[in-house]
């Protein structure tokens, strides 16, 4: 069974840092790109970041560029999101999702499946 | 930046057909994907590349895309179809989601 399990969420003060992890199982992790998507409480989905299968292509949403860093360890079947300089508006459930494309996204790729998410709360 | 516009809410009578639109400039030239999200759950892919259904998604779900509007159609709506629905496209090195539509089955 394909499974994605996020961890690392929690309460952090503004300006603080947090590292999210996403453990993948049930598929060949190294041949798929991955994405992080977040959802603020009561709000819609917001794409955060993309990383290709070999980490050759990385993209960020403007809202997190320069503060967040995506990475992966194919040997450990794991995806990461390092979040620095956190703000109250970063409060959200963070989902990792498998991206069907191995390389640079062209739009004809999609997300399937998604993990259950991990909640990040930025508050003093 | 590219914007996708969805109605905030759509209502449909049990057993009838619901249509959820996703508007965007020349969206017909892009691949549109649709996700269903039920309360407290992660999103689930229901349509990819405009009109393709993943395995396990009922045939009642269909999609189309032309001009400035993509549409998700749910035929013979069931109570279990109540959820938020999001459209998605890729534009200028960024994934873009619509604001989401809450489907209510009456």
Image: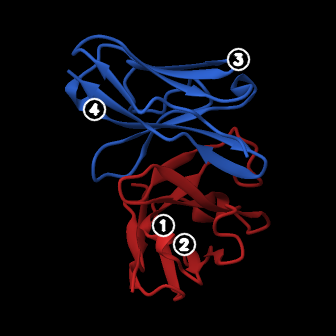
Chain colours: A red, B blue
Q: Pointers 2 and 1 in contact (CB under 8 A)?
A: yes
Q: Secondary structure at mark 4?
A: loop
The residue marked by circle 1 belongs to what chain?
A
Quadrant in the rendering for residue A4: bottom left
Q: Secondary structure at mark 3?
A: loop
Q: Earlier in the sequence, mark 2 or mark 1?
A: 1
Q: Secondary structure at mark 1?
A: strand
Q: Which residue is mark 2?
A: A77
What is the C-alpha distance between the residues marked 4 and 3? 28 Å
Q: Which residue is mark 4?
A: B82
Tell me which residue sits at (53%, 21%) in the image.
B71
Mark 2 or mark 3, whichever is nearer to me: 3
Q: Which residue is mark 3?
A: B67
Few, some or many residues within 10 Å of mark 3 (<14, 14–19, 20+) = few
Q: How far from the left and from the top, in percent, is residue A15? A: 54, 87
Q: Secondary structure at mark 2?
A: loop
What is the C-alpha distance between the residues marked 2 and 3? 41 Å
Mark 4 or mark 1, whichever is nearer to me: 4
Q: How far from the left and from the top, in percent, is residue A20? A: 49, 77
Q: Pointers 4 and 3 in contact (CB under 8 A)?
A: no
Q: Which mark is residue A24?
A: 1
Q: Earlier in the sequence, mark 4 or mark 3?
A: 3
The residue marked by circle 3 belongs to what chain?
B
């Amino acid at each position: 069974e394909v499974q994605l399990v996020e961890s690392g969420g929690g309460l952090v003060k503004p300006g603080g840092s947090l590292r999210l992890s996403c453990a993948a199982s049930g598929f060949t992790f190294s041949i798929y790109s991955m994405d992080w998507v977040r959802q603020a409480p009561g709000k819609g989905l917001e794409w955060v970041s993309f990383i290709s299968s070999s980490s050759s292509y990385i993209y960020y949403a403007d809202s997190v560029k320069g503060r967040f860093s995506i990475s992966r360890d194919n040997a450990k079947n794991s995806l990461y999101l390092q979040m620095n300089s956190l703000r109250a508006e970063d409060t959200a459930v963070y989902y990792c999702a498998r991206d069907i494309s191995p390389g640079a996204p062209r739009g004809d790729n999609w997300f399937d499946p998604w993990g259950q998410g991990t909640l990040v709360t930025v508050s003093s | 930046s590219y914007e996708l516009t969805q109605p905030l809410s759509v209502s449909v009578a049990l057993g009838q057909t619901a249509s959820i639109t996703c508007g965007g400039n020349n969206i017909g030239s892009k691949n549109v994907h649709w996700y269903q999200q039920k309360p407290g759950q992660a999103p689930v892919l229901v349509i990819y590349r405009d009109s393709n259904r993943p395995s396990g998604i009922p045939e009642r779900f269909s999609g189309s895309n032309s001009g400035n509007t993509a549409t998700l159609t749910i035929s013979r709506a069931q109570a279990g179809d109540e959820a938020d629905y999001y459209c998605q496209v890729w534009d200028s090195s960024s994934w873009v989601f619509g604001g989401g539509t809450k489907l209510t089955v009456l």
